[in-house]
Amino acid sequence: MKLPFRLIATLVLISLTGTFAYQAYWLTGLYGTMTHEMEKNIHEAMRMSDYREMMLRIKKMQRENGQHGSVEVQAGYEAGSENPVVSRDIKDDEGNRLRKDTLAPEESSAMLRSDNGLALILHDQGSTQALAGFIQRGIHSGIDLFSSPDITVYDSLLTLQLQEYGIRLPHHLEYFRTHTTPDSSQVFVDTLGRVQSAGYLPSKKAVRYDYTLNMSLSETYRLTMEPVDGLILKQMGGILATSLVILLILGFTFGYLVRTILRQKTLEEMKSDFTNNITHELKTPIAVAYAANDALLHFGLAEDRQQREKYLGICQEQLQRLGGLVEQILSMSMERRKSFRLHPERICLKTLFPTLIEQHRLKAGKPVEVALDIEPEELVLTADRIHLSNILSNLMDNAIKYSPAKAEIGIRCRKTESGQVEIAVSDHGTGIPADKLPHVFDKFYRVPTGNVHNTKGYGLGLFYVKTMTEKHNGNVSVKSEPGKGSTFTIRI
Ligand code: ADP
């Protein structure tokens, strides 16, 4: 089946980008909401602290002064006219009027018409928060007549309240009053108090939060603090980390998926190449063995002993080649691996190698020199004879195939300290680049040679060697240097 790789890759890319964009959108939204919430909290903390500071003053006054009075603030419009009037009636605790002032018409007007002023109460009765603010400012105007706000107390209360909201930042606090000249041409600012966290100097990025506390909106607490961005990012730390981990996992999973599909695709192509070529390859030994057999049967060659042995030898060699090819094909199939059984026997290497070397010399088609070194001479190992022959055949085949015009091969057999037998097949051939070495034992892998295709093969020989040595509880390793040669070592 041809995999719609482009489609899969596009879909994967779209879904990854989509997920990433959605996460970014969601996180930005959350950041916005949290910033808004924190600013709301700061304003609320300023209002609450103001209220508490006022209550503390009232309690203090009650303790210090047995006499109590009342302050009535009246606001409205002059009967039958559009002119606003605000008046203040101060009485002692027996109800005797101590003082009554009426604000100047411009001041009353400013108070009533301002957005947060009385106009809100008169026109938008539903706004409870504004109503609360208005009442608070009303109380202020009464209390402040007897005792002024204490900015130090306010600062302590504010610091506590901010901490309760998780805002622990150094700040600067100012309490000031603004006056406007009657013709509104000039504004004067009187600083009434200032408190500051130890060693804090507001930077250029510092943010100001104003809270107006009295009825005529002329007195303000100004809080100056560094931006809360860092705090919010800190609070979002867990969410950010989780999102990052999710994205990383997703990216990794998709990457892995694409890689697997790519591998599958290459494997699929290799398999189809292999099937096409191997069919051709299988035909040759069958045809040669068939012809030799035919000569023996139909042309009377069986009578001549020398000829008979020669033709039977050809048949055997071709059948062996066929057997080797079939083994390679079978080594790929899972079913066979499950029901696979070895037939181990004790094999004396001294007797195994000469035949193998002779066979390879004959079929090599180029001069082959083999230096065989078995130590001790009678070295014996326990293995399946057919598979061991195939393993060694594959290694020798490669050593010859990947050697220049003349192949010089070394075979060295030793017993290792762990009791295993080690057989190393080395050559002075083309060698394998270091970055390709880890793949040479993979199924269908062939070191890329660009456009040069002068050595035949399917990339199955070493896969077979590895599979079979592992079946023998052994292992195979390779050392190679391009241009100098390679050494493949099996340990069984
Ligand atoms: P192939 O049928 O292609 O030889 P193998 O599985 O036997 O397949 O080998 C895999 C690849 O490893 C070969 O294509 C070749 O590039 C490289 N290789 C194997 N043996 C040698 C060697 N002795 N010298 C250089 N390269 C080798």
Image: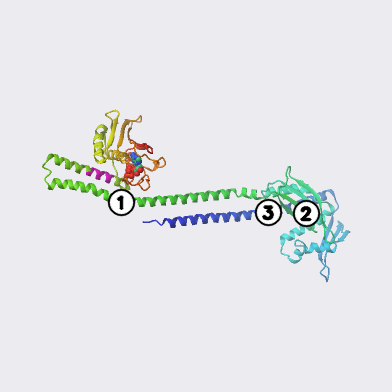
Ligand 1 contact, mark 1 (Cβ < 8 Å) = no
Which residue in the structure is indicated by mark 2?
220
Taking depth in this image into account, of 112 and 245 the one nearest to the observer is: 245
Q: Give the residues drawn in magenta, as a range.
A: 318-327
Q: Position of residue 19 (x, y in %)?
A: 52, 55
Quadrant of the image containing the N terminus: bottom left
In the rendered structure, which disc, 2 or 1, sits on the residue that comes first in sequence? 2
Quadrant of the image containing the C terminus: top left
Mark number displayed over residue 39: 3
Taking depth in this image into account, of 94 and 177 the one nearest to the observer is: 177
User: Quick one: label 2, few (<14), some, or many (20+) residues within 10 Å?
Assistant: some
Distance, label 2 to label 1, CA atoms, is 88 Å
Mark number displayed over residue 275: 1
Mark 2: secondary structure: strand
CB-based contact (under 8 Å), mark 1 and mark 3: no
Mark 1: secondary structure: helix
Q: Please name the amino acid that badge 2 sits on.
A: Thr
Nearer the camera: disc 1 or disc 3? 1
Mark 3: secondary structure: helix
Ligand 1: quadrant of the figure: top left
Q: Residue at x 37, y 50 (%)?
A: 267
